Image: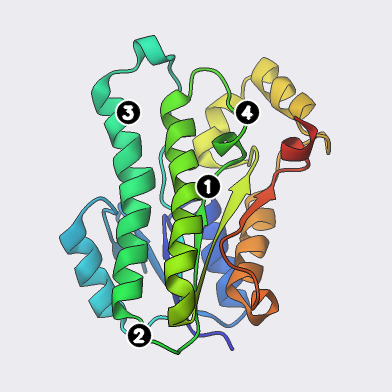
Amino acid sequence: MPGRVLVTGGASGIGAETCRVLADADWDVVAADVVAAVDMVSLDVTDEAAWDRVLEDAGPLYGLVNCAGIRTRSSIVDTDLATFQGHMQVNVVGTWLGIRGFLRRHQPGEAGAVVSLSSVNAEIAVPDQAHYVASKGAVSALTRAAAVEAAPLGVRVNAVAPGPVRTPMTAERLGNPEQAAWLAARVPMGRVAEPAEIAEVISFLLSDKASYVTGEVLFTDGGWHGHA
C-alpha cells in the first residue's frame, strides 16, 4: 500500500532517517526542508504560500510527516518574545499549515495518514525549555483535534512523542557528560534513542498496520513517560 508521502525537516535528524526508512519500505518520498540540499524540496513551514506551492507540486499524497521543528534552551525570564513566537511558528503553525493543506487536497473516502512530531516534554516539563514544551503540548492537542475532523474524510492523524534522540538538535547537550548522564538517568531503558527507532514508529503509523489508530500521541521514549 505504500504511496507518496511528504516529509518535512527531511535534511537531518529524525526527518532524514524517516525519509530513508520510508524509501526502504517502497514509499515514494518527497523530502522537504528549509535547508537547501540535493534531492530536497525547499520549504519554510511557516510560509503559507510555500506550503501551497509544495503541496501542489507534490501531487496527490497518501501521507504527510511533520518532522520540521526547532528547540532552544533558556529560562522563561531570559527568553525573549521573538524566541517564544519562533517556536510557536515553526513547531505549531508549521504543523497546522501542513495538516490543513493536506486535508484541503485530500479526496474524501480515500485513505490517508498524517504523523507529526510531539515530545515527551509535551506532558513532562523540563526546566529552561518552557517555549519548546508549550509548542509540543500544542502539537499533541492539535493532533487529537485534527483526528476528529479528519476521520470522516478517511484520514488518520497521529503523533509520535520521542524522548531524547541522538540528532544534530541534541548534539551539544549529549556532548556534555553531565547533561547526557542526566538524560540517561531519566529514561528507564538507560539510553537515548537513535533516529531510526523513531522513524520506524512513524512508518508504522503511516501503514495499514495502524489502520484503526488515530488521535494518538505515541510515546517513544524508552519508558520516560510511564516512569515520571
Q: Which mark is residue 118?
A: 1
Q: Which residue is mark 2?
A: 60
Residue type at mark 3 is: Phe
Q: Circle 4 — which element?
A: helix
Q: Reading the chain from its start, which is encountered first: label 2 or label 4?
A: 2
Q: Reading the chain from its start, which is encountered first: label 2 or label 3?
A: 2
Q: Circle 3 — which element?
A: helix
Percent coordinates x, y for residue 178 in the rendering: 68, 15
Q: Which residue is mark 3?
A: 84
Q: Is residue 119 above or below residue 201?
A: above
Q: Say if residue 176 shows up in the picture.
A: yes
Q: Circle 2 — which element?
A: loop
Residues at circles 1 and 2 in contact by the CB criterion of under 8 Å? no
Q: Residue drawn 35% across and 85% down?
A: 60
Q: Residue drawn 48% across and 48% down?
A: 141
Q: Residue drawn 67% across and 49% down?
A: 219
